[in-house]
Image (cartoon, rainbow, N blue to C red):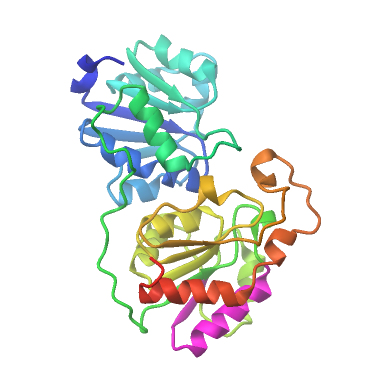
Amino acid sequence: MDGGRDGCRSLLVVHQGALGDIVLTFPTLTLLREKFGRIDLICRGEVGKPAVHIGVVDATSSTESAAFASLYGRPSDDMIRRVRDHDAVLLFSFSEALEAAVQGIGIECVVRIPPRPDPDAPVHVAPWVLAEVKAAGMLPPDAPADPPFFPERSFEPNSAVPIILHPGSGSSMKNWPLDRFLTVADRLSDAGRMIEFLAGPAEENLAESLGRSGFPVRTFPELTDLADWLRASAGFVGNDSGVSHLAGYLGAPTAAIFGPSNPRQWRPWGPAVSVVGPAEGFECRPCFERGNRDCDHRGCLAGISTDVVVERMMGLWNGSSR
């Protein structure tokens, strides 16, 4: 893309990944905002709503709509109009067919990059996305080399504000045992910290189990409400999940527990994040990214102690591990 496109005024971004994938593009999208007066996002379901809520993009719509699906065949009049409303399109996609369809609508400035690097690449997704966008000419060469954090909030330890624990994720394979989350909750509570649990709207069984713990349990049908709660929290403990990514990006002190996935690529991107992983000796990792998801022992997660998780969270809370 040549420098003549620096005058583009409106950008359409398409990303079909889950919440965590979307959140890891937020730093690059904030830099693109300095070039484009408007950014619209097409993504899965409701996952784009936090991006609108915190001002990363202006509007969002769903890739699950019939209008978007038409791009893989004969684009509908509505989809043609929506694409043509933009001066440039950024596709996070492996699909050459999608790229050709958008180009066929008559948009001169179309950039397609893979939504994630190779599973074995020694790079984090957030700076990788930024580097790819810069290499495509959508940002000037002097743009920051490091993805920016969300404008850092002023954090003051406050025992009257809850530390949030979320024992779920998009895959049970990535979940640390529930009883260990309960132990962490007890330990933090004994140390004088307020504790609340989070269960997602599709985690009814988890919510039922947590309801017997004696700690408050919250669910958030709206991701915008969840974002506000995370942003105001005193900290967050969770698995490798989209919620952990959102918490970390919004500045909550975040202890993220990683087992079968690769924290070098997928750790939450934020100013106060600590990853807790297994000891060495699990050469099978990161089996989650490699598609080997039939592990029957999850030893990488079983070996993570509650002592370490509590220590990391308390260190973040007190500012000593940030």
In the image, is residue 141 part of the stretch drawn in magenta?
A: no
What percent of the width, then of the height, locates residue 81? 34, 20
The segment highlighted magenta reads 177-197
What percent of the width, then of the height, locates residue 198? 52, 68
The residue at 60%/37% (across/down) is 119
The quarter of the picture where residue 8 lies is: top left
What percent of the width, then of the height, locates residue 67? 46, 26
Q: Is residue 164 visible?
A: yes
Give the residue at the far front of this rendering.
Answer: 280
Query: Which residue is at the front of the view, 66 or 271?
Result: 271
- Give the side of residue 4 with respect to residue 273, left or right: left
Q: Is residue 217 visible?
A: no
Report the number of discs: 0
The residue at 50%/19% (across/down) is 98
User: In which quadrant will I find the C terminus?
Assistant: bottom left
User: In which quadrant will I find the N terminus?
Assistant: top left
The quarter of the picture where residue 87 lies is: top left
What is the magenta segment's predominant secondary structure?
helix
Query: Which residue is at the front of the view, 230 or 123?
Result: 123
- Give the side of residue 116 with respect to residue 155, left or right: right
In the image, is residue 180 part of the stretch drawn in magenta?
A: yes
Query: Which residue is at the front of the view, 187 or 217?
Result: 187
The quarter of the picture where residue 103 lies is: top left
Placement of 228 over or under 34, stated as above or below: below
